[in-house]
Image (cartoon, grey):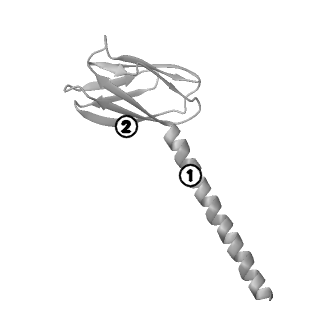
Amino acid sequence: MNAIQNILDLTSKASALVILTAAMISAQAALAADSAYTLVIQDHRFQPAELAVPAGQKIKLTVENRDSTPEEFESYDLNREKIIAGKSTTTIYVGPLTPGRYRFFGEFNPKTAQGVIVAK
């Protein structure tokens, strides 16, 4: 009888571990989804021009250039500089950010391609 009880105890512990692991993976996926944002370059402008993100989290920023010409995502505040070829997409990681405003611009079209990330 003790052997059966031991097997049941081990089975219960293994089941609990599987459930806990699945919950942790789901939570990580949810956090990753919350930390992914997209900027679009179209007509030499960033859309949205103001992007709100949570402070204290690493951010995955996808930049999609819909224009046929290249543009550069540049930010002195974020210490990032990346050329995005025309009709292409790139990923930029930033953060974790403290609360505040972080300006960025397109170096090839600085008068129109401007924006800000606001960490709250």
Dot 2 falls on a residue whose secondary structure is strand
Dot 1 and dot 2 residues touching (CB under 8 Å): no
User: Along the horizontal axis of the image, is 70 left or right of 58?
Assistant: left
The answer to which quarter of the image holds residue 79 is top left
Q: Earlier in the sequence, mark 1 or mark 2?
A: 1
Query: Please, is residue 70 above or below residue 34 in the view?
Result: above
Front one among 94 and 6? 6
> Badge 2 local density, few (<14 within 10 Å), some, or many (20+)?
some
Q: Residues within 10 Å of mark 1 (few under 14, many from 20)?
A: few
Q: Residue at x 33, y 36 (%)?
A: 90
Residues at marks 1 and 2, CA–CA distance in whole angstroms = 23 Å
Rendered residue at 68%/65% (across/down): 16
Image-quadrant location for residue 97:
top right
Q: Which residue is mark 1?
A: 26
- Name the kind of residue labelled 1 in the image: Ser
Residue drawn where x is 26% and y is 28% of the image: 66
Mark 2 sits on what residue? 91
**Whole-percent x and y of residue 17?**
65, 65
